[in-house]
Image (cartoon, grey):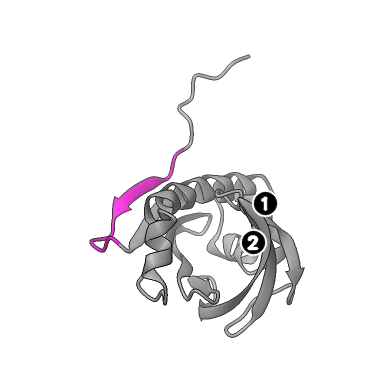
Amino acid sequence: MSSNAAPIRAEIFDTGNPKKKSARIVIDASAEKIFGLLINPQRHVDFDGSKTIQGNFSGPVTLKLGSKFGMRMKLGIKYRILNTVVEFEENERIAWRHLGRWRWRYELRPITPNQTEVTETFDGTTSISQLWLNWRKAYPWTQIAVAKTLVRLKELAERT
């Protein structure tokens, strides 16, 4: 039996700042369940829409403010990156950054006990290297990557 259902998509929206790229999606799961996936760096590879994360290589199983965690990455070449959690409100918000200082932020807003709106933002305003981000065309690329990540996060949270 085939389904004619429309593909799941995250809503890309204008943040009003060209250095912040965001998307949001509604997930049929509690904020606690979704946050549990976000604070486990070993699960990031499972919902990474950029397909750059190859796996986790260091850090705690559960993230909190100040946690450091290392990821194996591939973007043309293989490399490792160390991230630090710089924003943390349990079941509401988490953000991390690495040496370039740009941030990946997730914000959760419960709609019902089992339905949550999740917004992901790539925030380049804190970057120490705008030249690098512009040269890599990071802003248009990450706009699509955050939307794809949210779709994968939705699929993962709703099936586990």
**Left or right for 31, reference 136:** right
Q: Which mark is residue 37?
A: 2
Please state which amino acid type lies under the numbered disc 1.
Answer: Asp
Q: Which residue is mark 1?
A: 46
User: What residue is drawn where x is 52% and y is 74%?
Assistant: 97
- Which quadrant of the structure image shows residue 67? bottom right
**Left or right for 82, reference 3:** right
Question: For the stretch drawn in magenta, what is the main secondary structure?
Answer: loop
Classed neighbour count for the residue bearing mark 1: other residues with Cα under 10 Å, few (<14), some (14–19), many (≥20): some
User: What residue is drawn where x is 37% and y is 69%?
Assistant: 130
For residue 25, above or below residue 84: above
Classed neighbour count for the residue bearing mark 2: other residues with Cα under 10 Å, few (<14), some (14–19), many (≥20): some
SS at circle 1: helix
In the rendered image, the quadrant that contains the N terminus is: top right
Q: Are marks 1 and 2 in contact (CB under 8 Å)?
A: yes
Q: Residue 13: within the magenta?
A: yes
Q: Which residues are magenta?
A: 9-18
SS at circle 2: helix
